[in-house]
Image: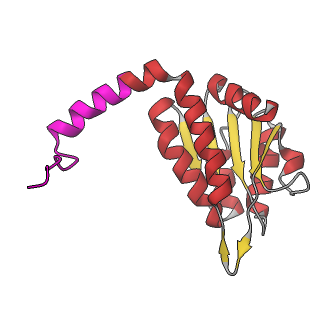
Amino acid sequence: SAAFQNAVDAILKARRIYLIGVRSASTLANFMGYYLNYMFDSVHTVTASGTGEMFEKLVNVGKNDVVIAFSFPRYSSVTVKGAEYCRSVGATVIGLTNSNLSPLAESCDHLLLAKSDMVSVVDSLVAPLSVVNALIVALAAQREDALAQTFGTLEKVWDENNVYEKRVDSL
C-alpha cells in the first residue's frame, strides 16, 4: 500500500528512529528495535509507561526524525501523548494501530493498520507483528550492503567471543 511504502521511505531518510510502545505493545517496539539496530545508527526504543519518563526520552526528537508508535485497544494515553508531542515538534510519525478511529490515528503522518483481537485476557499481536516483520524485511532489502557489512563484522566478533554455540551435527 502507499502508506506502507511511505513509511519505509520515511524510515530510510530519518536521522534518528524512535519506537514508542507501552504495556503489551512494548513487545512490538522492542522486536522492531532489535532488528533496526542492525540497519541504522540511531534507534531509540521507548517503552516507558509513565508520561514524565516518556517525555524525558523524547525530549530530543526533531524534524528529521521518525517516530513509530504502536497502540492497540485499550489504547495507552501515554503513547498517544508521546506521538502528539513528536508530531508537534516536526517529527514524522508512523502509527501502527487497529483502526482509523484509533486515538493514535490523528497524530500520525502515515497510518498502518493491523487487526488486534482481544482473545479472553490476552492481546493478540499476531497481525501487528506481521506488519512489523514486513517493515523489517522491506527496510533490510534497501539496506542490504550495510547489513552485509554489519553482519560480517558481527559474525567475526561473535565467533571470537564464543557468543553462540557451535553447531553440533547429530551423532
Residue 164 as seen in the image, left or right of residue 1: left
| Residue 154 covered by magenta stretch | yes
Residue 140 as seen in the image, left or right of residue 149: right
| Residue 46 on image: x %, y % | 60, 52
Count numbered badges in the picture. Answer: 0
- To which quarter of the image does residue 134 belong? top right
Residue at position x 76%, y 46% in the image? 95
Name the outermost residue toward the top.
145
Name the outermost residue toward the front.
171
Residue 21 visible somewhere in the drawing? no
Between 90 and 40, the one lying in front of the other is 40
Residue 109 as seen in the image, left or right of residue 10: right
Name the outermost residue toward the bottom.
120
Q: Quadrant of the N terminus?
A: top right
Residue at position x 73%, y 62% in the image? 116
Residue at position x 48%, y 45% in the image? 34
| Residue 131 on image: x %, y % | 66, 46
| Residue 119 on image: x %, y % | 70, 76
| Residue 90 on image: x %, y % | 80, 32
Q: Quadrant of the C terminus?
A: bottom left
Between 67 and 119, the one lying in front of the other is 119
Residue 121 visible somewhere in the drawing? yes
| Residue 68 covered by magenta stretch | no
Question: From which residue to which does the magenta span run?
Answer: 149-171
Q: How is the image coloured?
A: secondary structure
Between 64 and 104, the one lying in front of the other is 104
Residue 74 as seen in the image, left or right of residue 157: right
